[in-house]
């Protein structure tokens, strides 16, 4: 493996849509959500050990989760854990990692990915990432990975590519035309029918120099914060500086901040067995089902006349469910959720109402 290849794992999300299984104190990336024996963060870390050296893997998380990261990734070098003092979405997070790594290695090529995605075809993924890192090292281009859509999903962003793009040496690589945030069903269906749209995976590949150049051009206010810290990176002065300066960054995603504005963006067309596990519905799709199409986690769950449900309860709890069709049943710690799968978008409202009426005890 090439020493100039680095992986940046973004692990700062709160996973609110998976309440009550996911809590503010332990979001979904720190949970063995699929029952594999490893958390999503651990699976992501192991995946990147296949594309870069152990010393070249960085994890970016919120300060409050640094202990969880260290517990779950004991092999992560302490100086490879980047702690954000505040949540500011993905653009400041990515800028921080890029500037810090660039100060260490001006020839760095980076793959940046969330910590909570499923990728079933890991060999295909690693091949694309290695190809992307090699391409990133050769020029000022920004790459992302797009997923060939299998359905008109309204929960994903979409990337439109230029079908006539000819990129020598890699037929999977296409020039990006447009980015679209989560569309309505009719628009999503038209994207699927057109054949030139992909799901936006939120996985990026570029050289540290290329993404820093993009921040300088399209987000000078953000770049100023991290450019001013160049003499402080990888020194005892870094964290105190960031504790103050980071909070001055606006909260904005990398798509809005850079990708939708830049004209040097390319996408790998891929089929990775990918899911962003952003909803209970996507988790239901990823889990094994019984003969009634129920996805059950909980060794002492007994279901009668129930189908199309997702059940997530502790192994030591006896749960008897009768007569449900298409429901989420989830218990964790001191809370129980029973909700129609088709209404899971209400969960964020439930969480907000709980916070207002019951305080943070249950959140």
Image (cartoon, helix red, strand yellow):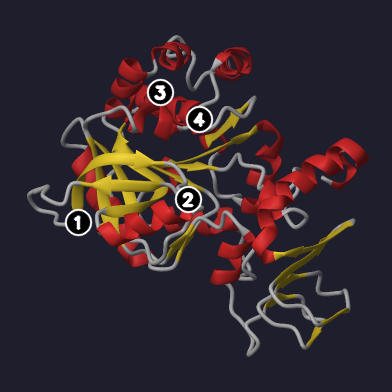
Q: Disc 4 designates what residue? A: 93
Q: Reading the chain from its start, which is encountered first: label 2 or label 1?
A: 1
Q: Reading the chain from its start, which is encountered first: label 3 or label 2?
A: 3
Of labels 3 and 2, the one closer to you = 2
Quarter-of-image position of residue 319:
bottom right
Quarter-of-image position of residue 340:
bottom right
Q: Reading the chain from its start, which is encountered first: label 3 or label 4?
A: 4
Is residue 11 among what the camera can see?
A: yes
Q: Disc 3 designates what residue? A: 99
Q: Callout 3: helix, strand or loop?
A: helix
| Residue at point 24%, 42% (across, down) | 176
Q: Reading the chain from its start, which is encountered first: label 4 or label 2?
A: 4
Category of crowding for the residue at label 4, using alpha-carbon neighbours closer than 10 angstroms: few (below 14), some (14–19), many (at least 20): many
Decide: is 51 above or below 258.
below
Q: CA distance from mark 4 to mark 2?
A: 29 Å
Q: Reading the chain from its start, which is encountered first: label 3 or label 1?
A: 3
């Amino acid at each position: 493996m090439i020493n100039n290849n680095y992986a940046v794992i973004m692990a700062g999300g709160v996973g609110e849509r998976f309440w009550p299984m996911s809590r503010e104190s332990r979001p979904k990336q720190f949970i063995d959500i699929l029952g594999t024996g490893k958390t999503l963060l651990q699976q992501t870390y192991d995946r990147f050990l296949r594309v870069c050296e152990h010393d070249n893997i960085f994890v970016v998380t919120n300060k409050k989760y640094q202990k969880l990261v260290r517990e779950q990734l004991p092999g992560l070098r302490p100086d490879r854990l980047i702690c954000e003092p505040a949540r500011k979405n993905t653009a400041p997070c990515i800028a921080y990692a890029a500037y810090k790594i660039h100060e260490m290695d001006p020839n760095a090529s980076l793959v940046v990915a969330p910590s909570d995605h499923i990728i079933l075809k890991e060999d295909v993924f690693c091949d694309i990432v290695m190809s992307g890192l090699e391409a990133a090292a050769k020029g000022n281009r920004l790459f992302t990975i797009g997923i060939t859509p299998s359905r008109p999903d309204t929960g994903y962003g979409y990337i439109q590519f230029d079908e006539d793009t000819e990129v020598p040496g890699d037929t999977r690589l296409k020039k990006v035309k447009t980015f679209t945030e989560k569309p309505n069903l009719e628009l999503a269906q038209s994207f699927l029918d057109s054949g030139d749209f992909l799901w936006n995976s939120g996985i990026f590949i570029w050289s540290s120099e290329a993404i820093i150049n993009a921040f300088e051009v399209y987000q000078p206010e953000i770049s100023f914060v991290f450019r001013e810290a160049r003499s402080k990176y990888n020194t005892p002065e870094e964290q105190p500086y960031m504790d103050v300066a980071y909070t001055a960054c606006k909260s904005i995603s990398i798509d809005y901040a850079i990708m939708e504005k830049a004209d040097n963006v390319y996408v790998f067309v891929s089929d990775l067995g990918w899911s962003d596990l952003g909803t209970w519905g996507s988790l239901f799709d990823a889990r094994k089902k019984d003969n009634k199409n129920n996805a059950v986690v909980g060794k002492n769950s007994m279901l009668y006349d129930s189908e199309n449900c997702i059940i997530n309860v502790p192994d030591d709890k006896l749960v008897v469910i009768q007569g449900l069709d298409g429901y989420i049943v989830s218990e964790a710690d001191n809370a129980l959720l029973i909700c129609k799968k088709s209404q899971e978008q209400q969960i964020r409202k439930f969480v907000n109402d709980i916070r207002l009426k019951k305080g943070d005890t249950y959140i």
